[in-house]
Amino acid sequence: MIADAFGIVYTGEEAARLKELTHSRSVAATPFGGRYRCIDFIISNMVNSGISNIGVIAQKNYHSLMDHLGSGKEWDLDRKRDGLFMLPPYVTRDNVGLYRGTVEALKSIGGYIRRSTQRYVLFSGSYTIFNRPFGHMIEQHINSGADITIMFNDNDILEEYDQYEDLRLVIGPDGRIVDLELNPYRSQNQNKSCNVVLMEKNLLEYLVEEASAHGLYDFTRDVLQRNVRKLKLFGYHYSGFVARLNSPQAYFKSNIALLKSDVRADLFDDAHPIYTKVKDEVPAKYGPTADVKNSIVASGCIVEGEVRDSLLFRGVYVAKGAKLSNCIVMQGSQIHENASLDCAILDKTVVVKRGRKLHGHEKFPIAIRKGSII
Amino acid sequence: MRKKQIVAMLLAGGQGSRLGILTSNMAKPAVPFGAKYRIIDFPLSNCVNSQIDTVGVLTQYQPLELNTYIGNGQHWDLDRIDGGVFVLPPYVKGKCGQWYSGTANAIYQNQMFVDQYSAEYVLILSGDHIYKMDYAAMLRFHIEKGATATIAVFEIPIAEASRFGIINIDDDKRIVSFDEKPKCPRSNLASMGVYIFNWQNLKAYMQADEENAASQNDFGQDIIPGMLQNGEVLYAYPFHGYWKDVGTIGSLWEANMDLLEDSPLLDLYDPFWRIYSRNPILPPHYVSAEASINCSLVAEGCEVYGRISHSVIFAGSYISHGAVVEDSIVMPGAHIGENAHVYKSIIDERAIIGQGVVVGAKPQKNLTIDNSLTGDITLVGYDMHIPDGTALPRGMVATKETLGYLYKKGGTTP
């Protein structure tokens, strides 16, 4: 289906929550699932819905994001008509280039929104991971006569304390949202927002102008929450796998969840593939002493040691005698002879030297910053 | 059109009949290799890495797969404003028009393409070898020597020399004579089928060759001997490194197995000489708790529940619980059923091997198997479905016909 919609992806989320992992990158550019970056999922979802006009709002640390997205070629978004638009901040008379919130970000890209010719707009964050084209959601939005539709799910694998920007939808019998709870204390309500909001472009423009005229700057709090009664807000229920990468624990659990075949089948559904930047790596090579069980291994890896219940990103080297369990090892890291790691997240190009030992706990995985040598 | 110093012409028209059913629906250069590549990725990547950005790919046999694969060339960085990669099939010219009758004729019919770029030199490549080679260095050699033509040569064991075009040189590497598949070879320098010609000079020779009705319009048979006869200055450019003809089932299998060595002669990991290819849009592969993998290459999107040993597994394959794959090549999207055993075999794309099937089983006395192409390698064809419990004897080429014969003879007991 060809959607009469364009997409806006906001990547300025508070990156501090992922600690070491977002030291020098935005959450959107954080590696996930052995070969992807978080933002690949939302962009692929949009592309798989027939959306070919996507604006990506950058805020801080967006070099690695821009490097990743490039011209949008890998998502089939290098187009003459529409395509991928990187929208970095800039300094004007009205703003200093640093957004206090999503409303300010949307205001500053007013030109892009105005020029987009599609009727509907999908506004999304970048740290929520799922695989679902938006055709149904758009259909439901039109049929229900909603002003705004918010996607949600109610089967989160994560626990309460892992969450931030936790938006809960209280839904009435007719499907209409009667209340929105932001970071509720012990909420009984499991309907969590997936951070994807659909509305008409005209309404978005109006709401952004209205909010900023009142000095308000956060779209969730100042626009959605304030308008629960005034506007018709509907929830769109999604029952598949959803990961929200907003803490190291959540990051760890969501990656490890991919070792379950039903999660993989859902997140990597052949019918709508997840696109990412390709690296032209050699297929993974297993040596004579390799011993890999229950793990995900990306291309370019050379494995000679023991790997259990782990994810190896592209180009990882595990030497003979090294032991890994419950680890997430990002691109280009090296684990030398007889090193032993458990419950660790190794960022890109980390080197763990011969015989070193690192043991975290699943509730508190050790995250090692990019390029560290241990 | 901007002038190009050199244009590459890749001869990809061969049927590759010695690869049997592997080339029944695709040209030889499109045959998968090394868990993710296709043969043509090697010459194309060599071109790009040698800063040659204009490549004509001459096709005529089953070109669909190859055309689709090459696309606009973006995967090799060959989507250029000036130049890039072009698929050049034979076409009708005025009242006539003909298939490519030989390697030289294919280039002759596409003179306009090279002329467009006012190229000084033309690099002729073939699409059936696996190697990494710097063509730019060869061009420098060609220019330094002031040669009319330069032929890349590779030292081979003298025992095999009678299978190749053999080149005899003097101390300066100037070519003295060229023997096509000689019975008594005088040297062990084999022509690699990689030539650099001065374009204007080659054009004259091709024209003369076309007018000679007895000619086979072939570089090795006609053009090069003709140049030597006329006293042209031809040089041999020695190539050192890994070079393998993958024109037969046996050599294709060997070349794949070569990659599984501890430090293979063909280094695919060199960041400055990457081999580019069309990458599958698939997640990383999954290795289950009961699986085991040793001495193997495994590509994206595979799900491994069985045992893989000394094998090359392409993208999107499924190795079921209890299955064993040894010394084999499993091409994209193949499915190996539960408890199936696959020994020294090539399983073509999308083939389904049923439960408990044995591929490469012991030969049975009452069966006559045509293994003239395969030797002891068992081949399962594209999209074939091997029913549960079947035993395919060593060397068999499993197609609908041979499978019917096997069943008539009761080939269900391993």
Image: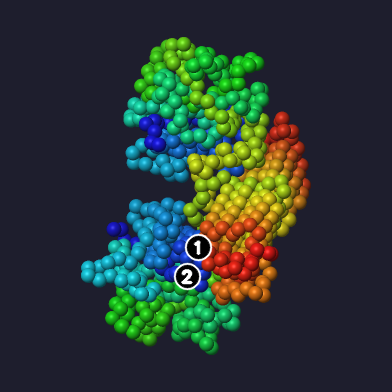
Q: Is residue B220 above or below residue A360?
A: below
Kindly identify the residue that appears in the image at 58 percent across and 82 percent down.
B158
Residue B12: give x, y in percent of width and height: 42, 66
Q: Is residue B12 above or below residue A335?
A: below
Which of B260/B195 is in front?
B260
Assign the C terminus of chain B to one quadrant of the image: bottom right
Which residue has dot 1 on it? B31
Residue count near mark 2 (Cα–Cα under 10 Å), binned few <14, some 14–19, many ≥20 = many
Residue A22: give x, y in percent of width and height: 59, 33
A88 displayed left or right of A305: left
Dot 2 and dot 1 residues touching (CB under 8 Å): yes
Kindly identify the residue that appears in the image at 63 percent across and 71 percent down.
B376
Which of A204/B359 is in front?
B359
At label 2, which amino acid type do we have? Gly
Residue B163: give x, y in percent of width and height: 52, 80
A101 displayed left or right of A201: right
Circle 2 chain = B
A150 displayed left or right of A35: left
Label placed on residue B16: 2
Q: Is residue A13 above or below residue B309?
A: above
